Image (cartoon, rainbow, N blue to C red):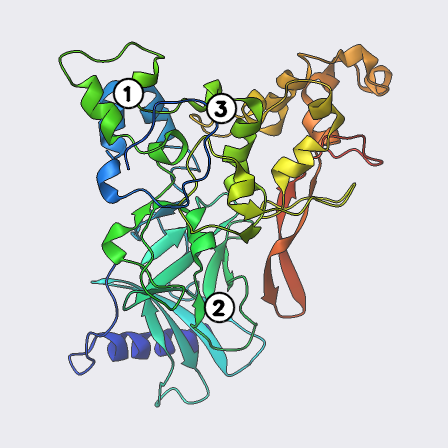
Amino acid sequence: MDEAVNRGNWRITRRLFSAAIPCALAAILTSQSGSQEPRSAPHTPPPDSAYAGDQACAECHQKESQAYFATPHYLDSTEPSAKTILGNFTPGKNVLLTRNPGLIFAMIAADDGFYQSSVNIRDPQNLTGQAEKFDVVVGSGRHGQTYLYWKGNQLFELPVSWWTYTHQWINSPGYIDGEAHFDRPVAPRCLECHATRFDSAPPPFNSYRRDSLVLGIGCERCHGPGREHVERERSPHPPAAGSPGIAIVNPARLPRGRQLDLCALCHAGPGEPTAPAMSFRVGDAISDYLKISAPPANAPVDVHGNQVGALMASKCFTSGKLTCSTCHNVHQTQQNAAAFSVHCLECHSIRACPRYKQLGESIRTRCIGCHMPVGKSQTITSAAPDTTLQAEMRTHRIAIYPQPATR
């Protein structure tokens, strides 16, 4: 089989990159108020001129920027390269077999980029499969990666993703195993949580102004557009620190509800948009932009589900001042579960835990594993022959669960 696949890969490469093939594959790609108080929803995405860019932020905030530029948030979408694409392009490892014995997908690294191609291996002399280029990498790789491609100014999901758990190529979410399609459009609501900014183009709904797409979750995604702030800081008389004149938002100074709303934009599930994508500004009320359904009681919550809602349903939230940033420092790379337990012990004594007599001091690092257990995702899944692959996610409803987890 490997030999046949390798011969097929060679023929695909020849077909893709011969001079006879036309090069039709696409190549990649209001100033901020200083007020920290809640605002009414503007429902108008800020223009490109309102942004300063991450490097301008890094000039003054080197410590925060250096750490943040290595986080999964910042790396959540990138341009394709041998470094950013985690998938294996080694012959024999660069294929996805499907339940259709006549269909495979081949991933090819070429001089001008990386490609995915559907291949009819029953008729290798008459290769008619579709081939598209990796144009956008989505996902830092903790769970996996999905890839997008441009067709004109429309953005589509490629049919094959990378699965970090088993280090293999898999069917992308939403695609049916054994079928060759490249037609799943990327909606603005999806892109809104995986990029810093973009401008939508006239319909269809997955059309964008390609040169407006800024990948990754940059500084201004959570602090608001920063050009006015940078210009004021560089002026001969910069505003006093913490004053409204700084023209930037520090989320830590927002009311508790508005802090949660900022996280809820991407961690409360897809929701039902009620305003244009990218019109939410830090400090706004999420209810002006998304209709969010409350999670069912005791239900596990996906990363695409309402994590913020699950947290808010926890007794730890209702009895205190807990916010997302109580445990998460977004400027740093994610800690492991054991390290998060220290936050629990700020309010709880380990001796009060019923399992303390059994586990002793070792329980000090097990709070998260027991009270926020890992479960199988119901939304981040991949269809595979005879099974469904499910990403593993940690619930954000802090509670007492019947069978404590070990992670």
Near-viewer residue (122 or 170): 170
Task: Name the residue carrying label 1.
Answer: 62
Query: First in sequence: mark 2 or mark 1?
Result: 1
Front label number (2 vs 1): 1
Query: First in sequence: mark 2 or mark 3?
Result: 2
Secondary structure type for disc 3: loop
Name the spot of residue 84 as percent of width and height, x first. 34, 47
Task: Name the residue carrying label 2.
Answer: 96
Near-viewer residue (71 or 81): 71
Q: Are marks 3 and 1 in contact (CB under 8 Å)?
A: no
Front label number (2 vs 3): 3
Say if 59 sits above or below 376 in the image: above
Task: Name the outermost residue toward the left.
Answer: 236
Q: Amino acid at mark 2?
A: Leu
Describe residue 303's horizontal placement relative to residue 140 as left or right.
right
The answer to whether residue 89 is visible is: no
Name the spot of residue 336 as percent of width and height, x first. 57, 28
Q: CA distance from mark 3 to mark 1?
A: 16 Å
Near-viewer residue (360 or 398): 398
Q: In the picture, residue 287 is in which quadrant? A: top right
Q: Amino acid at mark 1?
A: Gln
Q: Residue at x 37, y 46 (%)?
A: 44
Q: Residue at x 62, y 28 (%)?
A: 337
Task: Name the residue carrying label 3.
Answer: 329
